Image (spheres, helix red, strand yellow):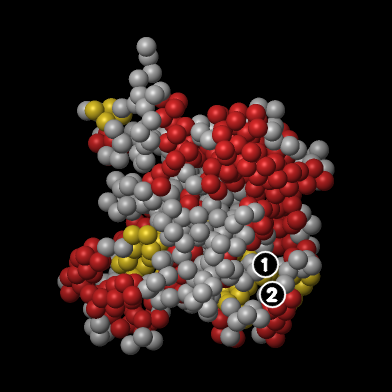
Amino acid sequence: MKIDKNTTLKIARLARIKINNNEIADYSKQLSNIIDWVQQLNEVNTDQIEPLKKIVEIPATFKGDEPELKDYSQDILENAPEKIENYFVVPKVVE
Amino acid sequence: MENEFSSIDKLLKLLKENKISVTEISKHFIDKIKKSEIKAFIHFNEDNILDNAKKLDDLKSKGTFKRIHGIPIGVKDLFCTKNIRTTAGSKILKNFIPTYESTVTSNLLNEGALFVGKTNLDEFAMGSSTTTSYFGSTINPCSKDKNKKLVAGGSSGGSAAAVSANLCLGATGTDTGGSIRQPASFCGVIGIKPTYGLCSRWGIIAFASSLDQAGVFSNNVKDASILLEIMAGYDNKDSTSANIKIPEYSKNLSSNIKGKKIGIPKEYDTENIPEDIKINWMNSKDYLQKNGAEIISISLPHTKFALPTYYILAPAEASSNLARYDGVKYGFRSKINDSLDAMYEVTRNEGFGAEVKRRILIGTYVLSAGYYEAYYLKAQKIRSLISNDFKEAFNKCDAILTPTSPSEAFPIGEKEDDPIKMYLNDIFTVPASLAGLPGISIPFGNSNNGLPLGIQIIGRHFDEQTILNISNNLEETI
């Protein structure tokens, strides 16, 4: 399966990762190699097989839906690259 | 004194008998870490260690002595540690200081652990060499030639190297596809990845959530048992953590393996394994047989599909988990401010390294419209088959014996031009990860080049005791 340059750019856009022009060819080649290599899974017939849903067979534990009343806003903002009062700051998104 | 500093068990005894203080212990290890040149740690703060040692000494003088009181422990820099920089080996988190403590590290601190530093790792735990870290490569202390430094394995290479070089007596690691077992094998130490759900994942920076599991490095099986029983346990902050009673592994530790059925999977005996690794594997089998175990041949028919399955599922989960690094909430942010999207895209390009970006792109591709069924769903179905293979095998045996890795530690810089070559390091460890099974790597034998090799023992879900006991038997044999 060949991943062409346009596909690489499309995936990069979906993943919100800028790829520089000089990197597109390399990424396309590496991604194609990896996708080619995983194609071997097509040797396995999985028509009647259910996808794995539970990794270990232990019952899930229920917990009460009780809110915790501590205000974590300062903790959450602590590592923000840019903040004003109780808000994260991002580049302007409206005209 | 060096010998007393080699095991948790021995050091605890000295502390209890008041023959040594935590401060003295801390000074010994600080000195060793400062002299060390293997770059096992990303973060190390002498004053913090001394402060904490003094607090532990004060506690002890007031009559409180905890289960691992004053024992020096390294922490993989993927565990969030409150007020201590936690980077995941990435530029994107290079200045991140968590405001909370992970459950596993909390459990260790509550029992008196003395953290000596945050250990190096492959960026976001993606790698098998600890060379993709933004902070440089860790050097395997078993390297024999100064001009040919070897990798420590990965992703938990810093932890494995630190324990191997006696810079601490135990260390935490995480294992998604082999990230504890493979570096343990390369560095000649014990490494255990418990059953998925035994330890809480809360506060561990996520890579692939259906596979990630915390575990332990140590120099002997008893120490691994002591640390594991402290780290493990149900946590209501992680809905996948198992609500079970944690056995007293160290108290129950035995080397009696009489009548234990040990399976040898024929699919692991491929022509691609080097001869010395194969012979070593067969030697370990012979020892266990001589010591009373019953050896049986088993089949895990879908083994060869485990690695490609893993390299669909793990990147898929990673692409989703790593979406959170957007330059807004924490971590590195690019100066590009033209638009919100431009800021996201440049931040993520500059903040992530090549392997992380590759995996995010693969993950995005296999989850994207039109490809989801062909890749992700297909891989989840094969994961079912792999899991069933093990279920059937465990109807016939109590544990499975394999080599840990298809190679000895390789030179830094090797295998880096070809991602798939690097992925093949995990060929023996990934199947158990996909099935959520516990696996341990125990140092056993050497390669033709005199480097340590590891033997992997895989157990049933939540049967860590059996694999610890078999390891204990093998350890006594060597």
Q: Nearer the viewer, residue B90 or B404?
A: B90
For the residue labelled by badge 1, is the local secondary structure a helix, a strand or a loop?
loop
- The image shows residue B472 at horizontal and vertical percentages of 55, 78
Residue displayed at 34% across by 56% down? B106
Q: Nearer the viewer, residue B46 or B301?
A: B46
Q: Quadrant of the C terminus of chain B?
A: bottom right
Q: Are marks 1 and 2 in contact (CB under 8 Å)?
A: yes
Q: Which residue lies most toward the top here?
A: A95
Q: Is residue B319 above or below residue B95?
A: above
Residue highlighted by disc 2: B277
- Chain for disc number 1: B
- The image shows residue B151 at horizontal and vertical percentages of 53, 67
Sequence order check: which comes first, mark 1 or mark 2? 2
Q: Amino acid at mark 1?
A: Pro
Residues at discs 1 and 2 both on one chain: yes
Residue displayed at 48% across by 52% down? B123
- The image shows residue B352 at horizontal and vertical percentages of 47, 44
Residue B406, disc: 1
- The image shows residue B296 at horizontal and vertical percentages of 77, 72
- Chain for disc number 2: B
Q: Is residue A6 above or below residue B356?
A: above
Q: Amino acid at mark 2?
A: Ile
- Can see residue B56? no
Residue displayed at 21% across by 65% down? B47
Mark 1 crowdedness (10 Å alpha carbons): few <14, some 14-19, many ≥20:
many
**Residue B185, quarter of picture:** bottom right
